[in-house]
Amino acid sequence: MSLEYFEGPAGCGKTYQLVEALRAFLNDRPLEEGEAVLGLTYMHGSRRRMHGRLTQIEAHRGRLLVCTVDSLARQVVCRWRTLARDIEPQLDLRAAPDFASICRVAAVLMGKDCVSGWLRVRYPVVVTDELQDCKGDHLCMIQALESCCHVIAAADEFQDLRSTGANAAVEWLHQGSGKRNTLTGNRRTT
């Protein structure tokens, strides 16, 4: 569908701009019956902060799911468990979660037309913060969402604390045809 993203250093207002972009999207295209906003982050602290900010937007009228990418993966695999067993026959959803396997299966599932169609109908807009933390199957899931939903994302390559090289998520953003918004300055302190 479409991608809009914000990048810049810590404190430049990426998350603020995410919220404002979502507000503008919902003004132009209000949610219909059965639709909700999907908010995604990699870590729970970021998820809690995002939930607090997104609940302040009245336009979604409480139709909001904010979760981690791992949690979305588990929800997709559980929802589409028959298809998931075709992909990974040994996957046992009753056992302790093996999130690497669950995310791998979810990424494949989300590439299927029936699953992406369901996601498009349920979540016309996806807001994802701290995208630089998504790698491998996590990033594949975001890419699958971008193919069927309007994605509003924020990332800062410098804040990727797990590697020192190029960041796959930021490279994907730069290679795509999404609307790039580069932010500068520091808005947190004077």
Image (cartoon, rainbow, N blue to C red):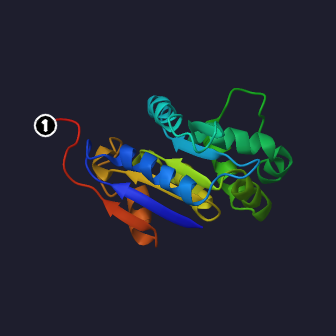
- Residue type, numbered disc 1: Thr
Residue 155 visible, this angle: yes
Q: Secondary structure at mark 1?
A: loop
Outermost right residue? 82
Residue 115 image offset from top left, x and y in percent: 76, 56
Q: Residue at x 70, y 58 (%)?
A: 120
Q: Quadrant of residue 161?
A: top left
Residue 160 image offset from top left, x and y in percent: 34, 45
Give the answer, above or below, for where 49 lies relative to 9: above
Quadrant of the rendering where the C terminus is positioned: top left
Task: Say left or right for 160 vs 103.
Answer: left
Question: Which residue is identified by label 1?
Answer: 190
Task: Say left or right for 68 vs 6.
Answer: right
Task: Say left or right for 79 vs 9.
Answer: right
Quadrant of the rendering where the N terminus is positioned: bottom right
Residue 127 image offset from top left, x and y in percent: 52, 49
Which sits in the foreground, 2 or 95? 2
Give the answer, above or below, for where 132 lies relative to 45: below
Residue 131 visible, this angle: no
